[in-house]
Amino acid sequence: MKLNIDGLLVYMPYDFIYPEQYKYMQELKRGLDHKGHCILEMPSGTGKTITLLSLIIAYMKRYPDQYNKLVYCSRTVPEIEKVMSEMKRLIAYYEKELNEKQKFIGIAMSSRKNLCVHPEVSQLRLGKEVDSACMNLTASYIREQSKQDRSIKTCSYYEQYDKNGREENIPYGVYNLEDLKLYGKAKHWCPYFLTRYILTHANVIVYSYHYLLDPKIAEIVSKELPKTSIIVFDEAHNIDNVCIDSMSITLTRKILERAQANVENLKLLVQSQKQNDASRLRAEYENLVRGLREQAVQRETDVILTNPILPEHVLQENVPGNIRQAEHFLIFVKRFLEYMKTRMNIQHVVRESPPSFLKDLQVRVCIERKPLRFCSERLRSLLRTLETRDIHMYQPLMLLCNFATIISTYTKGFALIIEPFFDSKSTVYNPVLHFACLDSSIAIKPVFDRFQSVIITSGTLSPIDMYPKILSFTPAIMETFTMTLTRPCILPMIVTRGNDQIAITSKFELREDQSVIRNYGILLIEMCTHVPDGIVCFFTSYIYMEHVVATWYELGIIGQVQKYKLLFIETPDSVETSLALYNYQKACDNGRGAVLLSVARGKVSEGVDFDNHLGRCVIMFGIPYVYTQSRILQARLDYLRENFQIRENDFLTFDAMRHAAQCVGRVLRGKSDYGIMIFADKRFLRSDKRQKIPKWIQEYLTDSLANLSIEECVQIVKKWLKDMAQPLKQEDQLGISLLTEEHLLSNDANSLTLNAIRDQKQVRNGPAVDINISEQSANDASDLHYGVVIDCGSSGSRLYIYIWPEHSGKTNELLQIKQLLDKEGIPVVKKIEPGLSSMAKTPMNATEYLKSLLDFAAQSIPSVKHTDTPLYILATAGLRFLTPRQQKQLLEDLFNDIVRDYKFLIEKTHFQVISGELEGIYSWIAINYVLGRFQNDISESKSKTDDHRKLNSQGRQSTVGVLDMGGASAQIAFEVSNSVPAVGQEVAEFSLGYDQHQEMFKYKIYVTTFLGYGVNKAFENYIDRIISIALNASLANSPLIRINDVDCLPRGYSRNYTRNNKTITAIGEGDFVNCAKHLVMLLNLNATCLKKPCSFNGVYQPQINYDLQDFYGFSEFCLQCFKSAWLYAFLHDGLKFPLNYQRLRSASLINNNDVQWTLGAILYRTRFFPLKTINQMKNTLSNHRSYTNTVKISFLICLTSIILLVIFSAKYIQSFIIRRKCFQSSSNTFNYRYKLLTSSTVDE
């Protein structure tokens, strides 16, 4: 089919297209138009690969001067083969439709092991053995030797390629790995080196991530890619880990011993070379004097010897004199090796930064930083000069030199950790050194900087906003797509308890609990009983799986499972796992059914698809958190917190949930497929876990499918499987989950896609949901008014739409404002990410950034109401940190563009950066409005809530106060009496009524913000305080400091901190009482109080009447843990709340309303709207009376004119005409005055 994607003709080699594919193409094209990077999450099994290929190839054909090459990176060889298969289908469709051969080359590239056709080398099992054997046949010095000695073997395939292949172009076409091998055999050319040569000529290249992200490979293979290439990282949910792994190195004592043997062996080879042919060593020395950069043909066959990552200017430099000669270089390496062996001879854990390591290295053995940077390249040069065979034998020494190069190149983003034991379970002394990359952006930054469009995509990227942070880039497009279905073919469920009502969880404290393990076994037995074909189970780790399986065996659960299905288990050994997968598939194909027990983060979870009968059910036993006691992980968490402001728990939960989503996503590989997803852990029910599940799964994870027992789960599964057993007809899918070319031509594609998404909601929830109000319904509800508020926060912007009826005209009533709801009763809200502050450097793009929100508002509000609908864009935390000039530029650009493009009621005062205090006042207004505290008649409000109601001194209801405890700051707002003077910034006085002379809606509010007293900041201050005390009390030369019995950390919890190049280990005690005493000191209660009374830190605070005053806590106030002790001290010692105060409540949900400060903002800013309505009614009535009198006068004038016309004769006609003209002039004057009267309004 042919598609028109915003003016771009796209060929799609299928008769149907999914609605999400169409939307994906639109967003992808927008990203390419902007020449920016994209993050796109698309559900599993919805044709992401062909969507990418179709749109990008069409774009390259249309705009060859902008983009001329696609580099498609995938993770595994099967995924690469899948991409090539789709590409072949696409190019064949082009040729069929255009009736001509396409001048197009698409190739797949992989390692030597997958492309070698040499009869002997290709039979080797391990990749490093193939690389070494290949180099022994193709290295430039080997080939030179063979010219002198015919007995030396070379690769005939490479020789033929080198002779003829460089001059002859490969025919147009799409070549997968097998095609390249067949072509290589036919031409007797080496497919591997042929592929590397074709890279510069191919239109599309498909290969592994490492060819771009691993600098050791990218520097050789991908260096010549043009900047106009489009880069796609598919299945990129773990791309940050790939980046980190490519830059990390692990050294053990065994590796150092082998490296020492390599050095001794090289010494002998150097001595032998000096005796036999010293000219080669002299030639090498002269080359090193000139620099490191060599000819490409010489390096072509030496990929295994490339440097880890050296900047171009370093490669152009002269090699330092102390390592130019081979003997000197080996002495240098040996000295460095001895130092490393000494450093690893430890009995305790050491953690330090690269600068600290280099400083110690210089002090102890006088090795400077510069020669270390050349170690890797210098070793490569030496091995080539010595014409060394069996390069893989020197892998330990290469690893050591790579370590030397990287640690001397980078000073930030890495950590050096030396441990006396190889892992946490070992008891045998075996020291290990981890040089861990902590910043994933280091490896991928060259890709973002070099190429103008990089697309990161996967089916499981939620939460999507985390990736721009950890990869340090700003995406032009960031979008998550839903899945349109004609039937609910996925059944996600959260099982939280067994039939005995005991909670099930893989939490560390309960892992040994036999009741939990037994309930897990019962769940598996029940699924085996009722679910046909294959069931895949994922555990959190191999150790936990082994323990659970052993316990199941003792309890007889394994035997019961095997009554229904065969059982297979994944192991760390890849050969065993491959065998288990083969037999699992065979059992499912034969109809016997099988269960596969696997591990999250293992081979099965990442690269194996269980389509159709191979995976009817996936069970996730627990949340797959990474091992949190890993010191490498702790170092990375510290780095993320300090440099990216990402909290430990946020990242750990993000990492765990993306792996859980990846596991359950294996079950669905197409819309005709169906499967069950069971999240078996009570913690999945928590909002911080549940909200990080991909959106396309969340849509089907309704509240009725959460918090289930095993028995409830079984009943739901039985009913659902009966529904899935019904035949799925293609005609039922057309127009909903399948769109044809006719659909797209006969309907607006955007509205068709929206209709399809609406129809899929009917699949889940019954009647369709339509948030758009038609013109007819707008006329029927003409007395409704609308208002729009966009909250531009630091992490994203959120749109709220409010409605209210005509005001009654009574002075004792406010507007009855409510949030707009859809037909399901769900608030109409839309959020985009990142925050508006990200547009600070490009304010001209701010309107484009908000366009989706503004269009959403325009669609949700009847068009006849747009001109009367006020639009407010209010920015909070993110924009406050910008300069006033940047704020002004952003808001002015927004105002000018929105006034031009939209018809909303807009004034410049509607676009503001509001202060924290004003945000606090809006929150106070919102919560009191929802609670009904602004109603004069208390009897009316009793039906809404059962809160305590008392009258204050003014004879009206007492309002509630607001406490907002955030991460960095805290805030309090409450009403004060009239006796409190409204001076300074703390006390604000305002009226919510439309009549300023009325006193009933005038309020005096105290509001203040305590910067630096939020829970996270308080914790940091507390840790800094105890560390400062420990540093002052410790020995000056001690690199390690241990702080025992830290009262505010959980008992037994330990954590390392680095200060002044020293490692401080804090061990928790968990003493609440002592913790609260320590935290009081952070409140600065002895600060000078300039204006009494004060709360703490010298901040003025009027007296609170605790008998009348209720308080509600926003944000994190009631959701803390350290943090309970800090809240205790903050409330009772800081704000002076009584110890027996029991009227503090949570404000997250009141009367089933989600309370947002934007409600307070719209209420306050539209307070004069009733006055406009009342005055318009008065003007209308006045104009009506004036109009009646005017009609009477006009009638008398007309009657007189007729009589005069009859009486006077023809000779007086001319004078009559003159009088008629005078009448018309008088009438025009009257009409003009009438228009002035009827158009008069009252402005705010």
Image (cartoon, helix red, strand yellow):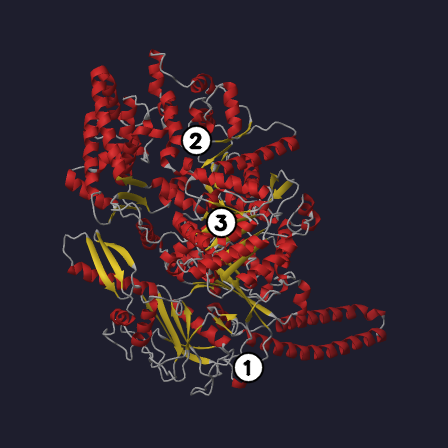
Q: Mark 2 falls on what kind of element? A: loop
Instruction: Please name which of the two marks, 1 or 2, marks the residue nearer to the observer.
Output: 2
Q: Earlier in the sequence, mark 1 or mark 2?
A: 2
Q: CA distance from mark 1 to mark 3?
A: 49 Å
Q: Amino acid at mark 3?
A: Cys
Tell me if I can see residue 841 in this picture: no
Label drawn at residue 816:
none
Q: Quadrant of the N terminus?
A: top right
Label drawn at residue 663:
3
Residue 971 percent across, percent down from the top left? 37, 70
Q: Mark 1 falls on what kind of element? A: loop
Label drawn at residue 943:
1
Residue 1080 percent across, percent down from the top left? 26, 72
Q: CA distance from mark 2 to mark 3?
A: 27 Å
Q: Earlier in the sequence, mark 2 or mark 3?
A: 2
Examine the rendered structure and indicate whether residue 678 appears above or below residue 1227. Answer: above
Q: Amino acid at mark 1?
A: Ser
Closer to the camera in the image, 436 or 779: 436
Residue beneath the point at 67% across and 43% down: 741
Residue 282 percent across, percent down from the top left? 22, 20
Left or right of residue 730: residue 34 = left
Examine the rendered structure and indicate whether residue 52 appears above or below residue 814. Answer: above
Residue beneath the point at 22% across and 44% down: 357
Label drawn at residue 111:
2
Examine the rendered structure and indicate whether residue 695 appears above or below residue 305. Answer: below
Decide: few, some or many residues near mark 1? Use Cα within 10 Å; few <14, some 14-19, many ≥20.
few
Q: Amino acid at mark 2?
A: Ser
Tell me if I can see residue 531 in this picture: yes
Decide: few, some or many residues near mark 2? Use Cα within 10 Å; few <14, some 14-19, many ≥20.
some
